[in-house]
Amino acid sequence: MIVYLVRRVGQSLLAVMAMAVLVFIGVYFIGNPVDVLINPEATQADILATTERLGLDKPLWQQFGIFLGNALQGDLGTSFVYGRPALDIILERLPATMELALVALFLSVAIGIPLGVWAGLRPESIAGRTIMGGSILGFSLPNFWQGMLLILVFAVLLGWLPAGGRGATTEVLGLQVSFLTWDGLSHLILPAVNLALFKMSLIIRLARANTREVCLQDYVKFARAKGLSPRRVVLVHILKNIMIPVVTIIGLELGSMVAFAIVTETVFAWPGMGKLLIDSINLLDRPVIVAYLMLTVLIIVGINLLVDVIYSLLDPRIRLSEMKG
Amino acid sequence: MTTHPAAPPRAAPVDSPTRRIIAQFMEDRVAVLGLILFICIAILALMAPWIAPQNPYDLSQLNIMDGALPPGEVSFGTDMTYMLGTDQQGRDMLSAILYGLRISLMVAGVSLLLAITVGTIVGVTAAYFGGRLDSFIMRVVDLQLSFPAILIALILLALLGRGVDKVILALVIVQWAYYARTVRSSAIVERRKDYVDAARCLALPHRRIMFRHLLPNCVPPLIVVATVQIAQAIALEATLSFLGVGVPITEPSLGLLIANGYDYLLSGRYWISLFPGIALVLTIIAINVVGDRLRDVLNPRLQK
């Protein structure tokens, strides 16, 4: 187990390093790094001073060392726009994004799995076909357009829910959360549904395919032959066995939800770090872009690592085959 | 619960595998409808300059008096009817959509061809030579696929700036890995077969074995992945343009048209962004329906 863990952590570090190199090349190599890293309104003396401070007169490999050293100490530069460390600004926005992603994940699982199992049990029925048709729609509607439709219907035409913003928040354990007040919750519903729909379609298809497979297994036939109630067969025998692939996907999709939140946050003006990224790209606030990227890479790699380790704890075959390979 | 017996195959016995596949494909009415829809959309996009009521980017044809007219209104200057309304600059939305469709499909199509080329070469090479080269290439592919496509594309465009060529480049970089992985996994199975050994015994050059013997046998899964990916590419390009990092304002794709109309959506002028969105979604649905059927017909082991 320890060998596996060390190997897997090593791979993750390599992935983070590879992304750091790419970010470094992207920001420092394409175009003049002075233009990229220094406020365009700076004076000549400022530019010289900053060039020296950032070590931009040194050879490239040394510069990379400095970039990496600073990054490890949590220094990813100072935002041009806010005049504060870029990482602090991102971290302030992180809870809003995580809340959105987690609520969306919950929605997609809580709705996706029952629908998928239902469609898998009766693949030829009208309900089953409708669910599958709906999931094709969920796949096909681009995230941003689907969000706009939600706003058009529920905010503009019906006027039930607000079109954007976060609304009132309450503090729980030092974090600002929305879902405890009605105002916050009403702001949260549309963005969460928007972010959830794509993943929901994915989970529906996965759950359906697996249910169909599991239904043909001998142990399900045996459970039925034994006279167990259909309810028990579905809830215990089928559900348990489809959960293995579903759980893996859920873990991996959490990372991609953080990335897809960029779109949802922009459409709904949700004050998370994805919206901050788009604002920073438009304002050319590059230190914030770099900080966002490095943090997101860390989150995604971290989640992948966690899922793999949990999975290998549950299923020893993976651990063994990885060690051989 | 009752189990339904599988529908008996209705296709008449035909000779070549291609004809069998086409016959099977035609059995599904929804898929045929999707294919017809896609062909119509592609023709409309190609013919845009000839069939559009006006050239939406020729400023002399625009009349600012016609700004933000709802669908069905008649122009103040000429007696032209705006079937789908106009945007804030008095541009006919139908024409703008036809031109936008053209750019969306062009960007997705070119990036698809480039990404398939790169991915296929890399994938076949990895499978054919195996060993360290293979494991190195697959590490890179896995590393890239562990990050969401939208994140990679967004960062690339944030660094490179906007432009049609840059969007294409970003889409190629995002997508090549899917093709490399698909081709590699089917080529690695084919590689062990006797005809490859036979070709090697004839001392044919590696390149010839790779592309004339191995590659043709890896095509079916490639087609399935390509249909999924082209729908993804269209959606991704639209998303990037919507976020303001995609195509420039001078060459608006459907995504940019939707973004332009977004500000007017809340004030009730829904048509400026609703109709381009419907065009976009119809295109993507048509491709996805065709892809779904192809997956069943060609029946490869599902990758990812």
Image (tube, rainbow, N blue to C red):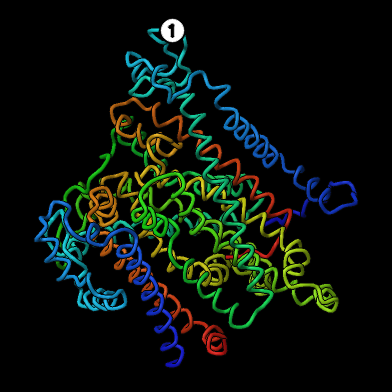
Q: Which residue is mark 1?
A: B78
Residue B259 lies left or right of residue B177; in this view the side is left
Residue A37 position, x and y percent, is: 22, 61
Q: Is residue A157 visible?
A: yes
State the image quarter where residue B70 is shown.
top left
Amino acid at the residue labelled 1: Thr
Q: Is the residue A319 above or below the residue A185 in the image? A: below
From the viewer's side, name the closer residue of A14 and B31: A14
* Left or right side of B14 for A239: left
Residue B19 to residue A63: above or below: above
Residue A169, located in which quarter of the rendered image?
bottom left
How many discs mark residues in the rendered view?
1
Residue A121 visible, this angle: no
Q: Could you tell me which chain the residue with mark 1 belongs to?
A: B
Q: Residue at x 42, y 16 (%)?
A: B61
Q: Residue at x 59, y 79 (%)?
A: B133
Residue A185: percent from left, percent from top: 25, 50
Q: Position of residue A87 (x, y in %)?
A: 20, 66
The residue carrying pointer 1 sits among few (fewer than 14), some (14 to 19) or many (20 or more) residues within 10 Å by Cα, namely few
Judge by depth and name the residue closer to the eye, B197 or A35: A35
Residue at image location 49% in from the left, 66% down from the top = B145
Residue at horizontal 46%, vertical 89%? A4
In the displayed structure, does residue B191 sit left or right of residue A147?
Answer: right
Q: Image height check: is B25 above or below B204?
A: above
Residue furthest to the bottom: A2
Q: Secondary structure at mark 1?
A: loop
On-image quarter of the N terminus of chain A:
bottom left
- Quick one: quadrant of the C terminus of chain A? bottom right
Q: Residue A293, image x and y in percent?
A: 31, 64
